[in-house]
Amino acid sequence: MNKFLSVLLLSVVLFSCSPYQNALKSDDIAVKYEVATQMYEKGKYLNAIRLFEQMAPTYRGKPQAEKMFYMFAQSYYNTKQYGLAGYQFDSFVSSYPRSEKAEEAAFLSAMSYSKLSPVYSLDQINTFKAIDKLQGFINAYPDSQHLEVANATVKVLREKIEKKVFENAKNYNTISDYKSALIALDNFIADYPGTPFKEDALFYKLDSAYKLAINSVPSKMEERLNNAKVAYTNLMKFDGSTKYKSQADAMLARIETDLKQYIK
């Protein structure tokens, strides 16, 4: 037998006889717990998870169950299995509400859902769930050391939702459905008065009102030109040095020129 095969065979034998492999095959829960804890403490979370999964169905009520289920949830979190982590942390808080780890588990549950939040263009069900979880955590633990991170995460998630709503409203402008754009943008501005997208929303409201006006039938043009002029004024009141100023000023010049025909 050559040296390579000898080393390979020895590795297989040693691996097959490792404490971890023995624990996987063992029916002794105490053995599984001891080895799983060792794997967890060494950062070998995937190995720990396999043992925790074997133990979980029959481990509740045992003296070390609280620690085991906390490590189980943390192992999922540390391996970025956030859906499973969120579920396990929720279960931990429900089962051990007086645990010294309950606060951290509630925080990590919410953070797990926040990490499942997709890009703004996709369905935001996990974003809403994360906001609810984080707000629940903030209300339950107003003095928590995690409060700053929780509040910052809520802000990011809310802005993601606002961006989705804004982009949906803006899309009506993109497809030249200016009437629908005006309604959607008005609703957006009313629903999210402090949004970081307000300047953009006011500009696209102006743009929609302007394009609706200059493409109107004569009987509706004067009213719509005046509406567009109001939209210009609202944008300038919000920010007189807006990044859209040159475009907005060009629209206003056309609006005022077209309105001259209605002066009697």
Image (cartoon, rainbow, N blue to C red):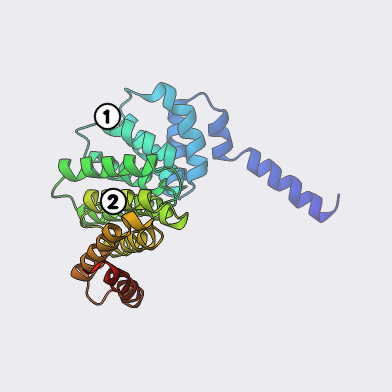
Q: Give the residue at the far left of this rendering.
A: 143
Q: Is residue 22 above or below residue 245?
A: above
Identify residue type, mark 1: Ser
Q: Position of residue 259 (x, y in %)?
A: 28, 68
> Which one is in front, 157 or 250?
250
Identify residue type, mark 2: Phe
Image quadrant holding the C terminus, namely bottom left
Q: Is residue 221 above or below residue 56?
A: below
> Which one is in front, 181 or 243?
181
Say whether residue 157 is left or right of residue 79: left
Circle 2/circle 1 CB separation < 8 Å: no
Q: Position of residue 7 (x, y in %)?
A: 75, 52
Q: Secondary structure at mark 2?
A: helix
Residue at position x 27%, y 29% in the image:
94
Q: Secondary structure at mark 1?
A: helix
Whether residue 102 is visible to the viewer of this picture, yes or no, is: yes
Camera-side mark, 2 or 1: 2
Residue for badge 1: 94
Q: Give the residue at the far front of this rendering.
A: 264
Q: Is residue 106 above or below residue 115?
A: above
Whether residue 37 is visible to the viewer of this picture, yes or no, is: no
Number of the label disc, if any, that sits on residue 238: none
Label 2 crowding class (10 Å Cα cut-off): few <14, some 14-19, many 20+?
many
Say whether residue 238 is left or right of residue 68: left
Label 1 crowding class (10 Å Cα cut-off): few <14, some 14-19, many 20+?
few
Q: Position of residue 23 (x, y in %)?
A: 53, 33
Residue at position x 37%, y 34% in the image:
88
Residue for badge 2: 188
> Which one is in front, 161 or 183?
183
Q: Position of residue 107 (x, y in %)?
A: 27, 45
